[in-house]
Image (cartoon, helix red, strand yellow):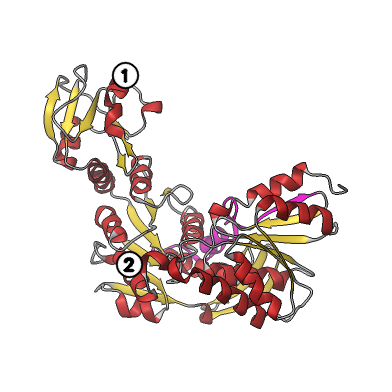
Amino acid sequence: MKFTIDEIIKATNAKILKNELSGGSFSISTDTRTISENDIYLPLKGAKFDGEKFCLDAINKGAAGCFVTCDSFPPNAKIVLKVENTLLAYMAVANYARNKFNPITVAITGSSGKTTTKEMVYSVLSENFKTHKTYSNHNNEIGFCQTVLSMPVDTQILIIEMGMRAQGEIELLSKYTQPDYSIIVNVGSAHIGRLGSLDNIAKAKCEITKYQKPDGTLIANDSKRIRDFVNFDGEKIFYSINDVTIMESRPSYTKFIYKNEEYELQVEGNYNVENSLAAIELAKKLGLSYEKIKKGLYNYHPIEKRWEVEEIKGLKFINDSYNANPDSMKASVSTFVELYKNPVVVIGNMGELGDQEIEFHREVGDYLGNKENNKNIKFITVGDLARYTGEELAKFGFDVKSFDNNFETSRYILDNLDVGTTIFLKASRTMKFEEIIQTVKEGDKHQ
C-alpha cells in the first residue's frame, strides 16, 4: 500500500527534517531485510531492539527515506521524518489507510477462541464480500499495522484480531481500528497472571468498544462479566451455546440447530459451535443469506496446530498445541475423550497463569477427573506444572504417566502405545509439542 509524503505527514504529524523528492508514492517498511526502492523505513523499538540503529543500512539498501526520533539521520536519505514514537506513527498510518479505503471493520477479542472465531468469520463473510483478515494470530499492535497495510485497496470487510498482555492494550488497538462491529468471544483465565482477576480480564476485553463507531454493533458471548463491564451505547447482540441443539457430533463433524436453522461444521466440540455463533450473528447483520452462512461455516478449516490430524507409524496424532489455558484445556480434552475410544491425552504446561499457576493446573485435573467416567483414558503429562494436573487425575484412578520433556514423552509413545491408538496433544505453544511428533517420525517403533 502506497502513500504520498503529504499523506504520511498528515497521518503521523511528522516533522520534516529533509525532503528532496517533489512527488511520488511510498510504502512503509519496518524490515531492512526486505527494503526496496520507494520504501520509507520506519524503525520499531523494543526492550532489546532499536530499529533506529539500522536507518543507514535501510538507506544504503535503497530506501527513499526513514523515520527518526532524534535530529540525527543518514546524510544520503532523501526523506527524513521525525516523530516521537515510531510504533504510534506506524499505527497512525494504518488508521489513515483504514479510513481512506473505509472497509467495514470487524474487531475480535477473547480469552480463548478468538483466532478460531476470526477464521470462521472470514470463511463466512468471504462468501459475499472481498475480505481481508489478521494473519495467523498476529494480534498485537504491529500485527494490526501489517494487516491493514497489506489489505487490497478494494477490500470490503477488514477483520482485526486483538490480543492483549495488559489493560489498555485493546483500548489502544480499538482507537486505531475504529471498528464498526466488535466481537468478544469469551472471558476466561488466560493471562490472569498479568491481570490478576477475571473481572480485570473482562474489563480489558471490553475495551474493544472504547472507540467503536456509535452506530455499530457489539456481538458477544452471553457472559455476566461482559454484560457488567461493557460500556457501549450501540446495539448489543449476545449469543449462547444454551440456544443450540446438537444434532450430531463425531470426529471432524458437528451438526447443530441455532435459532431454528441447521448448520454444519467440519470440526468437533461445543466450543467450536459456540465460536461459530458469532460468525452467524455478524453475517446476519451484514445481510448474508442463510445458504451463504451455512456454506461458509461448512468450509471453515482450522489453521495449523488446531486439531491438526496426522498419522505416523500407525498412530493417529491430533495436535491442538497452538495455545492453552484452563478453559480451552478443559473444553478440548473433554471433546476429544467423548469422540474417541481408548484415548491417550498428552497434557503440557499452560503459560501466563501467574502466582496461581499450580492451582490452575490442579483445577484442570480435578475438573477432568470429576467429569470423565471412562477409566480407559490414558493421560501423559509433560513439564513441571502439568505434573500437578496428573496428580489430580491419578486421585480418580486414571492411568497417568509424567515426563519432564518432549523427548521422554515421544520415547514412551513409541515403546508403549499400540498401533491404532489416537493421541491428543494439548499445551501452551512454548512447550513445542511438535517436537513430540517429529521424534516419533524419526524414531523406531521397535527400539
Residue 421 position in % (x across, y down): 80, 61
Label 2 CA crowd tier, 10 Å (few <14, some 14–19, many 20+): many
Percent across and percent down for residue 132 are: 42, 48
226 or 118: nearer the eye? Answer: 226
Q: What distance separates the C-alpha of mark 1 from that of mark 2?
A: 42 Å
Viewer-nearest residue: 232 or 311: 311
Residue drawn at 53 percent across, 70 percent down? 358
Query: In the image, 446: left or right of 325?
Result: right
Q: Quadrant of the N terminus?
A: top left
Which residues lie in the magenta part?
286-312
Expressed as whole percent of the image width and height from the top left, the position of residue 275 reads 51, 67
Residue bearing mark 1: 62
Query: Of the residues under marks 1 and 2, which one precedes in the sequence?
Result: 1
Looking at the image, residue 239 lies above or below residue 137: below
Q: Secondary structure at mark 1?
A: loop
Check disc 1: other Cα within 10 Å, few if <14, some if 14-19, many if 20+.
some
Residue 224, position as x, y percentages in the image? 39, 81
| Residue in the image at 65% along x and 73% along y | 391
For residue 406, the mark is none
Q: Which mark is residue 204?
A: 2
Q: Nearer the viewer, residue 320 or 221?
A: 320
